[in-house]
Image: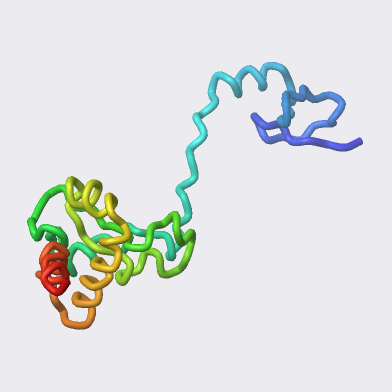
Amino acid sequence: MSKRKCAYCGDYFDRESMEIRGLSAFCSNAHFLASINTAKPKQKKPKQSNPHNDLSAVRDKILALDNYRCRYCGKASNNLAVHHIYYRSEAKNEPWLNQQHNLITLCNYPCHLDIIHGNKKLYQPLCLQIVWLRTFNNDRYTTIHKLERLTDDIR
């Protein structure tokens, strides 16, 4: 005879004598009813963070690198967003996606949502120029708006 463990008390009993409820087995109907009354809600397991996809670890660093100011308009705001220059939908799970050379600080509205997302073809190269200036020239103050005016003057 095979034995199974009671899901309530943890003791082992003959399989034929147990109450089977779904995938669980109980030594008696009383233990089944007791398990229902004392059931604790299942706790969600915390998501395991993938270091390549963990933006929260890098967010504060990007904000500090950009001097806690929007890199489009230059204003300090409480409503700052860290923008992916190459969008997450374009490069799913790439290891460089959440690294500082692909991230830039923008105020969420209007610069991030309306302006930058409104014309990706124009602003993606300008964002990359800002990141290049930030990385190699330690420039924390040049804005995309200034670069945009400079490129208009050149044309």
Is residue 147 toward the left or the right of residue 120 in the image? left
Residue nearest the viewer, comparing 108 with 154: 154
Q: Position of residue 44 (x, y in %)?
A: 48, 40
Res 86 → quadrant = bottom left
Up the image or down, 155 lies above or below 14; here it is: below
User: In the depicted view, which residue is nearer to us: 41 or 117?
Assistant: 117
Q: How many numbered badges does the structure rendering display? A: 0
The percent coordinates of residue 129 (x first, y second) are 24, 73
Q: Quadrant where the C terminus lies?
A: bottom left
Residue reaching furthest to the front? 155
Foreground residue among 77 and 16: 77
Q: Position of residue 43 (x, y in %)?
A: 48, 37
Residue at the farthest right position: 1
Q: Is residue 94 above or below residue 12?
A: below
Is residue 38 positioned above or below 63 on the image? Answer: above
Please report the residue visible at 50 percent of the width from the left and 30 percent of the height from the top.
Answer: 41
The figure's colour scheme reads rainbow
Viewed as shown, does residue 69 lie left or right of 59? Answer: left
Residue farthest bottom in this picture:
136
Residue 112 picture location, percent across and down: 23, 51
> At x 48% / y 55%, what residue is drawn?
48
- Image quarter of residue 89: bottom left
Q: Is residue 10 left or right of residue 145?
A: right
Quadrant in the picture for the N terminus = top right
Q: Residue at x 16, y 62 (%)?
A: 71
